[in-house]
Image (cartoon, coloured by chain):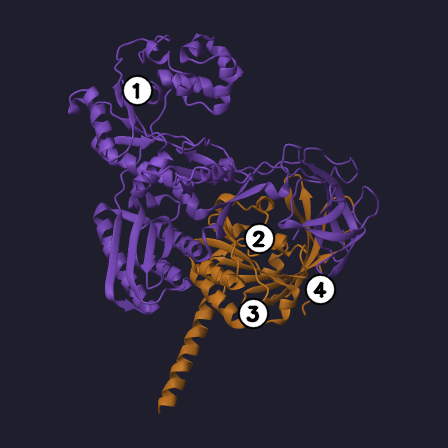
Chain colours: A orange, B purple
Amino acid sequence: MATRQIIAELSQRIRTIERTSQRAAPQTDLALNGLPGLERLLGDAGWPRGCLVEWLAEGRGAGSTSLALWASRAAWRDNLLVMIDSQREWHAPAAMSFAVDLNKTVFIRPEQPLDALWSLEQTLRTRGIGAVVCDVDKLSSQACRRLQLAAETGGGLGILLRPAMARRQPSFAEYRFLVQPLPNTSDAAVSRRWRVELLRARRQFAQRSIVVELSNGSDGLCVAAELASATPAA
Amino acid sequence: MARMVCVWLPNWPLQRLRHERPELRDRPVVLFSNTGNRGPRVTATDATVGLTIGMPLAEAEALLAGQPGIAAHIERHDPAADVAALRELARSCNAFSPLFGIEEAESPECVLLDVTGCEHLFGSEHNLVNTITNDFQQRDFQVRAALAPTIGAAWAMAHHRSPTPCRSVNCQGDLNRSGHKGLSYETLAPLPVTALRLPPKIIETLHELGLRRIGQLRALPRETLPSRFGAELLKRLDQAFGDAPELLVPERPLEPVATTWVTDEPLTDRESLKFVVGQLLDELLGRLKPRREGARQLFCQIKGTAARPIEFVLNLVSPCDVAKHLLELLGLQIDRTDLPEGISFVRLEATSIASLATRQRDLFGFETNTDTHREVSSLLDRLSNRLGASAVVRAMPLPDPQPELSVTHDSVARECRVSAPISIASVQIPRRPTIQSGADTPHSKELRPIRPLRLFAPPQRIEATDAGPEGAPMNFRWDHREHRVIRSWGPERIETGWWREQSICRDYFRVETQTGQHFWLFRCFDQAAWFLHGAFD
C-alpha cells in the first residue's frame, strides 16, 4: 500500500515538473537577437528570458565568445551582466567592444570549479541579472537541469561557452549552437567568417545553419552580412 | 577664529609599549623593523649606549652586549598598533572637545583637538591646556601641549616652543605679514624650520643653505619657494600661518554593538552553533532597529578549548537588517571553518553600521525596484563571502600601454564601503595604446586597437618557427597542438620606458591558424622568444 502511495506521489511530482518546463517554454518577453541572420535559426524571435544558451567551439580563439556576446548584447542593456571567470582570462577592455558596459558588469573569479558552478547557479537564480556568461567544460545533466530551473526563476540569460566535445552530452539548454571558423576570402582586413549551426532547440526550424561574417570596422566590430544559407535541414 | 590644541607625545612607540607593559618602565627599549632588504634596523630607542635610529640591529645588540648592566628590551616595531593606540587616546579626549583626531603623518605622535568655543567651559585657554596636560600626565603619559589658531602653529609650538609642559598662545587680533588675521609673525619666526612638519630631505636642503628659522623663510620671495624647495614647503608655511586651510580629520567615537553568548555546557555541532548565532543576531538587530540602522560589517568570534579563537569578518555590499540573509551568510562562513571542539563562547559584533536609508543607492546606477536591487545586493554578499571579496570584482580600464596592466579590478564589497559608484563618463574606450607604432606594412593600416577577449596572465612561452627577423612566425606549438599560421596582421610594437621597474619591448601579431583560430602573439626582444598572450575568442 505504502509503495503504491509513493509511486502515486512520484508520478504527481513528475507531472508537476513537466508542467513547469512547459510553462518555461519561450515567452513573449524577449531580448533581441543582435546577430543578423541568426533569426533564421531562432524563428522571428530573440532570446527568451530565463533560459540557457550553449555556444560550442573547438579550442580557444575560435570566436564563439565574440559571437555569443554579439548576439546576446541586448540582454544586459538595462540589467547587470555577470561574467564568471575562473581562469582569470577575461580581458575587460576588449569586452567593451561588445557593448559591455563595465560599470554594469561584475566579474566573478572563483578558484575551484565547483565554486564556479555554484556561482553560476546562484547568479542565474537572482532576479535583476540580465545575463551570465560562463565557461563550462563538464556538466552533468542533473547540474544542467538545476541551471535551467535557476534561469527560469531568475529570468536572466545564461550563456554557456563550451568545448565542441560537449555536443555529445545531453542538455537542458534552450538552444545549442556549434561555431566553426571558415576560411576567409578577403586578405587585407581583419575579418572572420563562421558557420553557426543550430544543434539543438526546443522548437525546430527549417534552417539549421548560417554563415556569419564579422569585420573590424572603424568603431569596433560589426556584422557584415549573412552571406549564404549553408546546409539543408538535417 | 579657530583654536587648535596639539598634544605631542614624544617617542610615542616607546611610550605606548611602556603603557601597555608597565614592567618595561625601568628598562631601555629598542624597537626594530625590516625596511627594504637591508635587514632589521633600529627604528626607536631610548638606550643611552650610543644607539642611533637606523642602525643595524646586529650592531645595536653588540653595543648592548658590551654593557652587561643594561637589560634592554628588544622588540619588533608595530606601527599599526601605535596608530590604533593613538586613535584610542584621541577618543578619550571627548571631554575637552567634540572634535578630536590625530595628526596625519607617517608615524603620528600628536593628538589634535579643535577647542574653538570650548575655552569658557574651563575658565580660560590657559586652564584648558593645563587640564588637558594634567589629564594625560595622570595616565602616565609624557606630553607637551600648545594652543594656537592653526594646527600647524600648535604643532610647531608643542614641539619647539614650550620648555614647560604647557603653554598657551593667545594672539587673537594680531595681523601677520600677509595682512590676514591670524598668528603673529613674531611667535613663529624664531622657531626652527623643523617646526614646519617638512620631510627630512627638504630640511636638509634648507640647512645646507643656512636657512634655519621660519623667519628667514618668510623673508624670501614667496613665489620662488615652490620651484626651489617643492610645493610642500609653501603649503606647510601657509598652513602654519593660517593662509592655507588644514582640516582636522575627526575620529568618531566608537559605539560597539555587540552580543556575547557564554555557556558552561560546550557546543559540539554546527547546527547548534548556527542556532546560537541566530539568537545573537536577533538580539543585535533588535538593538539596531530603533536606530534605523543596519550592519555593514559583522565580526564573529568563536572560542573553544583550543588556544586560538576562530574569528571571521562578514562584509556586506549595503547595510542590512534582514536576519535571514545575515544568518545565511554567517552560515556559509561557519560551514567553511574548522570549528574548535567544545565551543563555550560566541561573540557577534557589528563593527560597521550605516543608516538603512542609504541602501537605496544603487551600486550600478540602475533604476530598479527595491526588491530586485536587494536580491542583487544579497547575491553579491553571498558570492563575496563564500569566494572572498577579491573574487567578486568590477573592472576599470587604465590608460596603460602594457596590455596586462591596462585594467584594474576592484572588489565590489570594498568599493561600496569606501567610494561612490564609478561614473559612466570616467570609463573610456581604450585608445590605440602604442607608444611607438610598428613598421608601416600594408597590413598595419587596417589594424585597429582591438584587444583579445581572453588574455593569458602571465603570457605563455611558445616554441615558434620564425619566418624572418621581423614577421610573424610560420608555426608554433601550444596546448599540445601544432598550429600553422596562414595569415597575420602586425606588428604592433608595445614598448614601455626605462622608468618602469620592468620595461617591455614587444612586437605583437594577430595570427590566424589553419583551424581558423585567432591568437595574439608577441616577440619579446629582451628574451628573444615568442609568447602567446591571448586569444580572440
User: Is there CB contact under 8 Å for labels 3 and 1?
Assistant: no
Label 3 to label 1: alpha-carbon separation: 84 Å
What's the mark number on residue A231? 4
Answer left or right for B334 relative to B291.
right
* B81 or B56, nearer to the observer: B56
* Residue at far bottom of view: A1
Label 4 to label 2: alpha-carbon separation: 37 Å
Secondary structure under tag 4 reads loop
Dots 4 and 1 on the same chain: no
Q: Position of residue A70 (x, y in %)?
A: 60, 51
* A228 or B87, nearer to the observer: B87
Secondary structure under tag 2 reads loop
Crowding at dot 2, Cα within 10 Å, few <14 / some 14-19 / many 20+, comes out as some
Q: Position of residue B329 (x, y in %)?
A: 37, 58
Find disc 3 in the rendering and name its residue.
Answer: A171
Chain of the residue on which disc 1 is drawn: B
* Residue at far right of view: B468
What's the mark number on residue B163? 1
Tag 4: amino acid = Thr
Label 4 to label 1: alpha-carbon separation: 96 Å
What's the mark number on residue A88? 2
